[in-house]
Structure formats: structure tokens, C-alpha cells
Image (cartoon, rainbow, N blue to C red):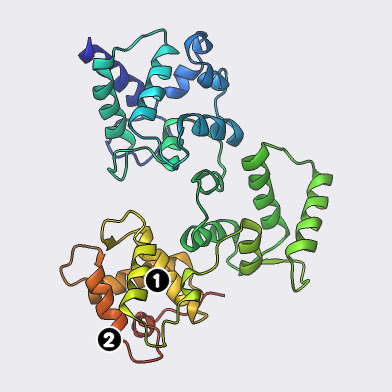
Amino acid sequence: MASRLRKGLHGILNASHSNHAGLKSHGKDARIMEICQQDNLAKGAPMLAVFKGKLVLSAADFRSVWEHYDSDSNGYIEEQEIDKFLKDLFEAQGQVIAKSDIAGLRATLLECYDLNDDGKIEVAEMSRILPVEENFLLKFKLENKPISNTNFLRIWQHYDNDRSGVLEKSELEKFIVDLMKTNKNISIKPKEMEQISEEILNHFDKNNNGLIEQAELRSILKVPDNYLSSMKLYENLTRQQFSRIFSHYDANGDGFLQGEELLDIVGDMMRMVDIHLSIDQLESLCQSLLSVIDVDSDGRISKNELADLFFTAPDGRNPFSSLILNEGSSPST
């Protein structure tokens, strides 16, 4: 029985679908869209009934499903929540799965979609399982935490299509469309768009140039202030202060800075000295940092490695300033 159900789940996940590229296990992909169109969908899984007859979920539908299964609102779908999702999925096909089969099915789902191998499903990973409309803001709005500087840079780069350093009329309108659909699934008519754009500019366009700049978009999205602004980094930084800094950026508490954590602290350090990097420049700078202070070459920064950088920098200088010069990158506009 367990083997048959696991084979069934593999069948669900194995068919090719062009919108689900980049899965961890090559050749495994989502047929959940087909499941969602079955006539018996609403019989045993009322939460999944929102999919019935839909080729693509709206951002609002996806948000409802995510919030239903992320029952503790921690930004992940974990063990028991995954189990609930799987039960609903199979019940929608008229199948009942025994408790003894759940662990194997969960392992199959994670094998296919848990791209970072953390044993849980994130928003981006769930969006590969379920067919959701393209909405760049959706992932960041569902993570149930403030938007980090790094994710803000990704958002900015997505909407600033021409890399002009400002959001012009068409770019602002695309942002507004995604924002409204993400929050309330509201489709905006042309006349309404003009009014909403005008209201946003009136409220957030501080220099009245008719454009939205980075600082102004930060206000719209309520991106938190730079954590390092409260620290006197260049006035006899204490070990206790340094420990607080490290703990703040070590989001998963594993004693290392890597990936997003490293991008966040480096980006905030640069902004402390009014250097505003693009996401590409920031990623390049982090690679330079790793090549300099990652002594054991494990691709992450330990507390001691970062301390060596902070406490050996010349007085009054940003510890990363020499890396900027060596990298040859220039501040983004």
C-alpha cells in the first residue's frame, strides 16, 4: 500500500510543466494542476477547491491556500502542515492515505521541491508545486516578516526595468498591479490606475519629480530601517555590540552567516557609508568577502572570521571599504 501511494505521488510530480523549471530532482515536476481540475476536487478537500477549473491560481487564491496550511504563520509549511496538504491532495482524488504512509509521501514531496534541503516548504517552493500567476511581490508579501534590504533590492531591480534608478509611469503601474492583486486580488481599470498612481505620488514622492525613487519605494513597502544605524560601529565597537550584530544577521542561529544572511549584513554595511549597490554588485562583493576572510573555505562566515574583519579595520573606516576598491564596483544610481 505504501509503495503504491508513493508511486502515485511520484506520478503526480513527474510530468513535465514549463512553468516549474529548476526543481532539485531532474525529471520530477508538478501534475497538481491536473489534479485540481478533477470533478471530484471539492468532495474531500474544501481548501483546495479554489483551484477547480483554473489553469493558474490568482495571487489571492494562492495566498489563501498558503495561509491555510501555514497554520502557525512562521513562513514555512513544516511536517504536520505538509501532512495536511498531502492528505487534502489525495482526498481530492478520492484516495485515503494511512498514517503509516504519510512519512514516505512527505519525503517524496521534499525530495522534489525542497530546494534548500531544510526539511520544509517555503513560499517560493510552494509556488513551484501550485500553478500561480506571475506576481513578483507575492513571495515577499507571504513570508510573514519584514522585507529585508536584500529582498528589497530584488524587488527594485524587477520593477526598474530600464535600470534608470527610478520607477517611471509604466514601471510604477506594474508595481501597483502586483501590489493590489497580492493584497486584495483587485484588478485595476485604466481610470482607477491613474488615480491610484497620483495618490501614491502625492503621498510618497517627496521631491515632487513625478517618479518613485528607491527611498520612496522603501517607504511604500515599509522596509525596516538599517539595523546597523543604531550601532556606533566606528566609535570603539565593543565585543558585546558585535555579538548583538552577529546574532541579528544570523537568522537561523547556526553560528554562521551565509546566503541571504551574508547579503543582508554586507548590504547594510554599505548603506551605512551611503554606498547603494545593485543586487548583482552586492552578490559580487559577498564573493569577494568570502575569498578574503573565509579562512576554512566552507562558503560561509563564522563569528570569529567576521570579528577578524571588524576589529582589524582601520579606525573610522567601513570594514568592507577595501573590498569595494578591490572589486572595482561603483555605487548604483
The quadrant where residue 163 appears: bottom right
- Residue 284: which numbered mark, if any? none
- For label 1, the residue is 266
Q: Where is residue 270 in the image (x, y as percent from the top left)?
A: 45, 76
Q: Check the image and report above or below for 47 versus 152.
A: above
Task: Give the amino acid at mark 1.
Answer: Val
Give the vertical position of 193 relative to 319 (above or below).
above
Taking 196 as reference, is 235 left or right?
left
Q: Is residue 245 above or below residue 173?
A: below
Q: Residue furthest front?
A: 240
- Determine whether 140 is above or below 214 in the image: above
Seen at 24% across and 79% down, the residue is 308
Quadrant assignment for the N terminus:
top left
Please, what is the three-letter code of the amino acid marked with disc 2? Thr
Give the Cα distance between marks 1 and 2.
17 Å
Residue placed under numbered mark 2 in the picture = 312
Identify the secondary structure beneath mark 1: helix
Q: Where is residue 209 in the image (x, y as percent from the top left)?
A: 76, 71
Q: Judge left or right: residue 131 versus residue 8.
A: right
Secondary structure of the residue carrying numbered label 2: helix
Q: Quadrant of residue 254?
A: bottom left
Asked if residue 281 can be seen in this view, the reply is no
